[in-house]
Image (cartoon, coloured by chain):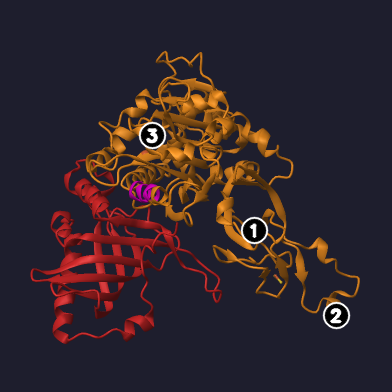
Chain colours: A orange, B red
Amino acid sequence: MDAKVDGVDGFEAIRQQVENGFMPLHVYNDQQVFDAELRKIFAKTWNFLGHESEIPQPGDYVTRFIGPDSFIVSRAEDGQIRALFNACTHRGMQVCNNEGGNTQEFLCPYHGWVYDSAGELRGVPHQRDIYGAEGFDRSQNGLINIRLANFDGMLFGCMDPEAESFEEYLGDFAWYLQLITRRSGAGLKVMGAPQRWVANADWKLGYDNFVGDGYHTIVSHQSALEGGALPFEGAEFLKYGIQINAGKGGLGLAEVPPVEGGGWPAEIFAGIEQRLTPEQGLIYGMGGGPVYLPGHGGLFPNFSFLNAASALEIGGPPIPYLTFRVWRPIAPGRVEIWSWCLVEADGPPEFQEASYRGYALSFGASGVLEQDDTENWTSISLVAKGQMAHQLALNYTMGMKSGVEPLADWPGPGTAYPTDYLEENSRKFYQQWITYLMA
Amino acid sequence: MLMPKRYHIYEEDEIVSLAGTTADNRVRIEEFLSHESALLSMHNYAAWADLLTDDITYIVPRRVSRKRGRGEAEFEELMAHFDDNAATMAIRIKRLCESTALWAEDPLSRVRYHHSNMRMRQLESGNDNANEWLVVYNLLIVRNRGDQPDSDLLSAQRQDVLRETSTGFSLAKRLVLLDHAVIGAHNLSFFV
Ligand code: FES
Ligand SMILES: [Fe+2]
């Protein structure tokens, strides 16, 4: 129980605890663990970078991060989107030091090398004189492209040329992401730039919470219920939800509040039978059963989503909203939270605006739900820094001995359980986490 | 369909060109804003709510770091840290006044609002029953909490519209133009 992380032996001790449903507390604020996470997880996995609707026009770009590494996600003149390592090949200067915009070129301020929006090196001041007529091949000195995948508009990048393809990586979780990305024929679009804020909290805590913690809602978010933002009778709805893990992701489904169409304008769903399989359609009640919100979930290592609903007035109806998350690791016990709000691109503008306002009321740094979430994760990460954190293994055993069994007739891939008060998704997350660390 | 612009940022030359104020009005307006911020510091949200108009808009837009000289918008129209009207403000205030589970504010934050460089101008938008004032000023918020030695700092320009009726001033619009693209606090469990 007191294993310091010290090479493979330390990780093996952690692996055994994780296997048994326990998680040593120190891993949420530990320099050795953090360094290993950057090297063995973030450098090897597919990471969410943004959404293609953020850069609709040629020349549009946004600057994004995988841990400390910065990338320019750019739509070049050819219309193609690339993820370019934001480092000049001459001395490593950042060629872009702002969050986004539209440009034909990235000019390095150090010596003036110029790259185009595809990352090609276009200009080197005094090139002939200083490198010789044949001595320098610009085509070999462009910005490094990392691998990029576009899943229904969601952009993922991977720094490892050897890693599996995104499709393999995503695996069965695609079935569940499509429930969100294919709800409307026009797909999703972002509402502005993602919010960003920092917390003295570990990145894993946000992911863990979004992927598998239906249990905290009733206590952590009691105030949102009492204020009227959560337009439900109680906050126990996830106890009767469904928890699923599939491939490298997991999610929880909750039955939508009993309002017409789940609160979405009906036109958003027009033609959905063509976009989803009949089995996927069952989630949206197309077989006559209950309608579910693909409520909360995530894809390893640090992409999360939340598809919930907020009232916009006391006693008002629930308005669905959607947020995407990246829990960007900054340092041991420190995270930068990136939070996008997305809407169906062809939804009525009034609905898009209402959905965004419900999101802004409930989530983000000021959200009447989220302000209490970051409070929890900050407290845990503070405790994790101490020596006693090596003696405490946190109890993640919920559902291991309760007799809860997977649903036998579940229409989707992966394993589904008839409750979302369950720590199965969290355990799966930490098993994946330790497997990567030990690879 | 084009939605109307959701807020207006007064540019400096616009502020300068509006009519000025008298010393008497300045004292009354500064007094009002000092009282208003004191209520927030005291977490007296019930009294604070009484100072808001029924058509209040309270927006703290996301600031985006841009390359200089390209004229790209620095403030997002449809992404903000707060984007409230009277109905959503009522939710925030009911929660703050009635909930017994305000974990992020237990213990209470100590939030101090520092106002400076204040300019105020009467707006045309008033009528016979109500004057409207644009008040533009710098804001520095220092939030400390618990026994933590470090404080959160937020720096901004506020552009308020105050409405003055026979019963006094109330806050009709608050637009907070943050100096931060990334918020350096784990939450905004207080009003900015
Ligand atoms: S570092 Fe970029 S041009 Fe020299
Ligand atoms: Fe939460």
Q: Is residue A154 magenta?
A: no
Decide if residue A333 is on the left or right side of residue A309. Answer: right
Q: Does label 3 point to a residue whose CB lies under 8 Å from ligand 2?
A: no
Q: Is residue A359 magenta?
A: yes
What mark, if any, has residue A28 been given in the picture?
none
Check the residue under mark 2 and report the chain it is in. Answer: A
Residue A406: % across, % down = 48, 16
- Quick check: A103 above or below A226? below
Q: Sequence order check: which comes first, mark 2 or mark 3? A: 2
Nearer the observer, disc 2 or disc 1? Answer: 1
Check the residue under mark 1 and report the chain it is in. Answer: A
Report the magenta residues as a range.
Answer: A354-362
Quadrant where the image shows the C terminus of chain A: top right
Q: Sequence order check: which comes first, mark 1 or mark 3? A: 1
Residue at the spot x=20%, y=74% of the render? B126
Residue at the spot x=33%, y=85% of the render? B16
Q: Amino acid at mark 1?
A: Ser
Is label 1 in contact with label 3 (beta carbons under 8 Å)? no
Name the chief secondary structure element in magenta.
helix
Name the residue furthest left.
B167
Q: Gap in Å between the C-alphas at discs 1 and 3?
A: 36 Å
Q: In the figure, residue A390 lies in which quadrant?
A: top left
The residue wearing badge 3 is A262
The residue wearing badge 2 is A129
Of B153 and A255, which appears nearest the observer? A255
